[in-house]
Amino acid sequence: MKLFFVIFGLSSVHLSQCGQEPGPFSEDMRVLNETIAKYGLPQDYKQLGFPGPKIALDDEKYTYNNKLEYEDESENYTLRIRTITPNFSYIGNYEEVKMPETFNQFPEIKGQVGEHFERKSGGFYIRTIGYKVDENGYRPFLLDLSIANTIMKEEDRKEDSKSPITFCGVDYIFKSTLGGGGGYSASFGDRYGGGVSGPPSKKITISSTVIATLTGGNALG
């Protein structure tokens, strides 16, 4: 189960405006402002040709595979490695390299690095930093900053049971005994007015992960 929403705010929304309301929003704005101060305003990774974080949630976290692909028979390659956590996954390392045709040229190198770290008010931050390497050196920039928060809740569900075999108004349900062998238990059906009780209910825990991006756009795959 997955949800997606945007709580977009850049440094133009100053923390001083909500200093009297400490909580998740002030923490998110602090992390966002610190990230922008270090890496600059977020860039549109789609326009720059980057895959972005491609966050996959819960039972979909294994959707994408790691890969190393070479272009035709050249030395150009694309590397993609995912980071997998118990509740989500994302691109941890991505690099695309195009080798020069002559020794006088510099290779074209671009990539991104992802990391996740704890959010004190719940969940994790997932930060994706892009970079380019050329004759001017190494240049990092911000691609995405998102929040992954897993919500746990309990629900009542009926346990599964095998369909009974009815004979002369009696429902026989095959079940395992403590000794490991099989046995039959019988309960009178509606023919004798006794009815058949349904399977017992039990508490199960369901988790759903929510993604919120602090930089706009869609951080999901």
Image (cartoon, rainbow, N blue to C red):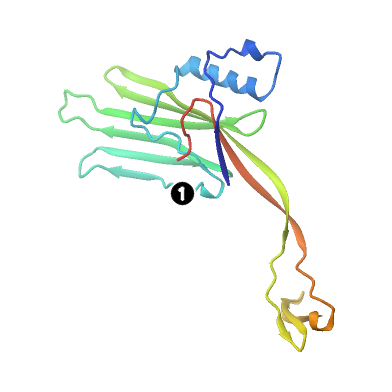
In the rendered image, the vertical position of residue 157 relative to residue 45, given as above or below? below
Q: Residue at x 64, y 19 (%)?
A: 26
Residue 201: percent from left, percent from top: 76, 61
User: Image quarter for residue 129?
Assistant: top left
Q: Residue at x 62, y 29 (%)?
A: 119
How many marks are shown on the rendered structure?
Answer: 1
220 with respect to 13 (left or right): left
- The one of 86 and 185 positioned closer to us in this rendering: 185
Q: Secondary structure at mark 1?
A: loop
219 with respect to 16 (left or right): left
Q: Residue at x 70, y 17 (%)?
A: 21
Q: Is residue 130 visible?
A: yes
Residue 150: percent from left, percent from top: 63, 40
- The one of 34 and 1 positioned closer to us in this rendering: 1
Few, some or many C-alpha atoms within 10 Å of disc 1 (few <14, some 14-19, many ≥20)?
Answer: few
Q: Is residue 85 visible?
A: no
What amino acid is at disc 1? Answer: Thr
Q: Residue at x 84, y 78 (%)?
A: 194
In the rendered image, the vertical position of residue 128 relative to residue 74, given as above or below? above
In the rendered image, the vertical position of residue 209 relative to residue 59, given as above or below? above
The residue at which mark 1 appears reads as 63
